[in-house]
Amino acid sequence: MVVIRVGDHEEEIATAEELERLCRRLREELQRGGCRFNSWYIRIPPDRLLGLLKKAYIKYTQGVVGTGEVIAEFLEEHRLSKSLYRTITPTLSSLGLAASGKFTGAAVEVGRLLAEGKTDEVKTRLRELVLRNCVLKEIMEKAGDCSELEKAVESVLAAYGKSIRFDELKYTAELLKMVHPKCEGCDLRCPTAERLAACVEKLIQLSHPHMRELFEKLDISLLPEHLDHVGVDGSTYLLSVRGTAKHIGMVLIGGPLESADLQQLKTALSRLDEKIAEGVYEVYVKILPILEGEEKCRTLKLLIEVVRGDLERVSKIVKLSS
């Protein structure tokens, strides 16, 4: 039996099933709540952090949960200075990976995922943990895209009155790039909901041939390839005829759906209708990504609906081959 400290209380874990239940509960709590940790301290490279968490899981299976023994052994194995201990422990604490001298259940879970080679799950779990740190959450929200991360780190930390060391800036940005969906680049092979966050522009481009077909059905005399789109936020784009500054429409992107269930599709489309008003623009294009198939490698479909200015509409579902 192993005792793991979770917040202000301790959990006794005797079986793998009990560990799984604890991990699920921790994940649910993280997803429900907002940020929790207000301290900020990232002073180790992300790859070193991941290596330590994998080590923590291996030692956990041997009954060791204390951070001291694991960190000391990790530093010795990698021939690193023992003085790094003082930068590692506050980094772990700021991410909710250690408390009261012990690794948390979240740290053990990330280590297990690393040991099992589940890279995508590791990134998802780390993203949840990062968003529980109020300072890191603010940085991620402030960074419009991946290229803005370093700038966002500097401005947010300066606003907290912190004098920034080069290594702190570097490692904080590297950690956030690892977990920020927009930093992964667009790859539609084996798509996931997280990866699609970096693929909005690509989805709009892939929709053009189908938009043209739907435009023709509604007698809209526009060609999608002659339109430019500019982002308002991650799910809303303004359309204009290329070479002009006049906005003639909008592209609205819905969140990824797990299936093509009819009622689910209707609900998602209705949610996007909240941004549509009769007579304001010539055309609105709604795009809903749909993920189907096996969990390991899913297929991607798009529900594309075109709405004319008088609210006449037509739609189709297409399967993407890429």
Image (tube, grey):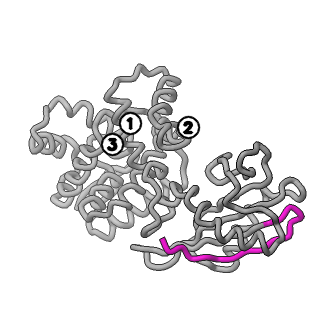
Q: Residues within 10 Å of mark 1 (few under 14, many from 20)?
A: many
Residue denoted by label 1: 172
On screen, 264 above or below 242?
below
Labels 3 and 1: the sequence-earlier one: 3
Residue 149 vs residue 316, the one in the foreground: 316
Q: Residues within 10 Å of mark 3 (few under 14, many from 20)?
A: many
Labels 1 and 2: the sequence-earlier one: 2
| Image coordinates for residue 121, horizontal then vertical, percent | 38, 61
**Seen in the image, is 297 located left or right of residue 2?**
right
- Find numbered disc 2 in the image and state the secondary structure of the residue it sits on: helix
Residue 119 vs residue 54, the one in the foreground: 119
- Find numbered disc 3 in the image and state the secondary structure of the residue it sits on: strand
In contact (CB < 8 Å): disc 1 and disc 2? no
How much space separates mark 1 and mark 2, taking CA atoms? 14 Å
Q: Residue at coordinates 50% horizontally, 33% vertically from top-left? A: 152
| Residue type pointed to by label 2 | Lys
The magenta stretch spans which residues? 307-322
In contact (CB < 8 Å): disc 3 and disc 1? no
Residue denoted by label 3: 99
Q: Residue at coordinates 30% horizontally, 61% vertically from top-left? A: 113
Labels 3 and 2: the sequence-earlier one: 3
| Residue type pointed to by label 1 | Thr
Q: Residue at coordinates 52% horizontally, 43% vertically from top-left? A: 145
On screen, 172 above or below 47?
above
Q: Is residue 261 magenta?
A: no
How much space separates mark 3 and mark 2, taking CA atoms? 28 Å
Q: Quadrant of residue 24?
A: bottom left
| Residue type pointed to by label 3 | Ala
Residue 266 vs residue 130, the one in the foreground: 266
Q: Quadrant of residue 141?
A: top right
Mark seen at residue 142? 2
